Image: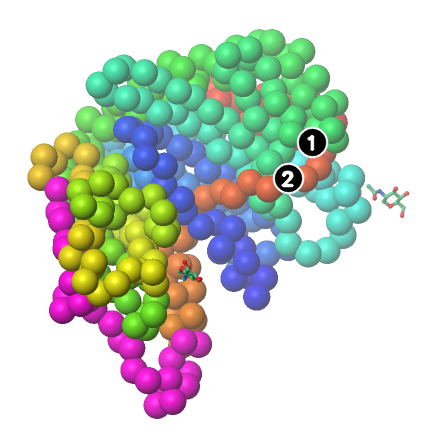
Amino acid sequence: MKDLMLLLLFCHVVSPVKHSLKFFFTTSSGAKKFPDFVVVVLIDEVPTGYYDSISKIPEAKQDWSQKMLEDDPQHLEWYTQKCLSTQYSYKAHIDILKQQLNQTEGVHIFQRMDGCEWDDETGEVNGFIQFGYDGEDFLAFDLKTLTWIAPKPQAIITKHKRDRDRPHNERWNYYLTQGCPELLKTYLDYGKSSLLRTELPSVSLLQKTPSSPVSCHATGFYPQRAMIFWRKDGEELHEDVEHGEILPNHDGSFQMSVDLNLSSVTPEDWRRYECVFKLYSVKDDIVNKLDKAVIRTNWVSLSEFPAGPVIGGVVGLLLLLAVCITGVFIWRRKNNDSSSSDPSSVKDAALN
Ligand SMILES: *[C@@H]1O[C@H](CO)[C@@H](O)[C@H](O)[C@H]1NC(C)=O
Ligand SMILES: *[C@@H]1O[C@H](CO)[C@@H](O)[C@H](O)[C@H]1NC(C)=O
């Protein structure tokens, strides 16, 4: 169960931004069958690089990121150093945290996410770096003031220490606003035939039981910048609607869905509803009218298949796990202290 929890912590959530480069560093302690240290690199939410404490060698996850590493040995060197230095400083760090929190056993996780977003239409750039401990917010960098934000009183001392290390903060600022966007643009250029493609999804209407909400499900689209919603008489609906998250498929495409609760809608009114899928950069929407005849369901009377919902739940969980391993973060809140490795050199700052 612990391993399952760990994987769920890594569940992948996609944000609707233009282009992004993100590094996820995860140090864990006490987790069996899972490397102590894992780095995942995502470009536009597509896994492009991977490193772990077992192989200690950065690995490209796409042909084009492999080509970029081969063409630019300096970048490979930078990437290797970034992984190695973070691995060693965080190994020490998670031990200090555990000690401070009297955590002698159990699984503990220390994470960092850093990266940048770039809007290729407006030219706008945004950088970020955040730390987390056991899945909870720990410390974040404010690029406007070049200071650190501590969500918990326990991290205040660390915050002040880091705030005083101005050169270190300046280097982060430079990396997040200059180095990272440049790197992102280079990656995008190498990967353009794949990253800048468009793929339309297949869209279906699904319903578990005759009284369940109708789910409009789109799968197989790319890029992830897409919208799906229900319309009634041509107007977007906000009530009785529940939006799902965008999730990655194994083939690099994405899926998402939106549910509509029809419990108070009469059968005659069904034809006034339709589901709309919009893909960024594609002019024509995919529109599905709400129609009993096209709804797909596996529903069979429960007396025949009493285990149906249970099996469905387990399969759902496995599916979630299957799409979730690419690297992630959820932030809750906890305690104490932090450290980082430098963007460009190995220099550990402000350990408590
Ligand atoms: C850890 O345990 C020691 C001794 O058992 C105690 O004095 C200390 O207050 C504990 N620290 C925390 C953070 O709970
Ligand atoms: C659908 O709406 C009805 C009444 O508006 C509510 O009782 C029911 O719980 C809702 N169903 C779901 C699955 O949200």
Number of other residues with Cα within 10 Å of mark 1, as a class: few under 14, some 14 to 19, many 20 or more: some
The single residue placed furthest to the bottom in the displayed view is 304
- Residues shaded magenta: 285-310
Residue lying at 9% horizontally and 35% vertically, measured from the top left? 283
Cβ atoms at labels 1 and 2 below 8 Å apart: yes
In the picture of the structure, the residue carrying the numbered disc 1 is: 152
Q: Nearer the viewer, residue 40 or 122?
A: 122
Question: Residue 54: horizontal and vertical position, in percent?
Answer: 49, 49
Q: Nearer the viewer, residue 260 or 142?
A: 260
Magenta stretch secondary structure, dominant: loop
Q: Is residue 126 magenta?
A: no
- Classify mark 2 as within 8 Å of ligand 1 or not, answering yes or no: no
Q: Secondary structure at mark 2?
A: strand
- The residue at the far left in this view is 284
Residue 327: percent from the left, percent from the top? 43, 45
Find residue 89 and report its horizontal and vertical position in percent: 61, 33
Q: Residues within 10 Å of mark 2 (few under 14, many from 20)?
A: some
The answer to whether residue 65 of the structure is visible from this angle is yes
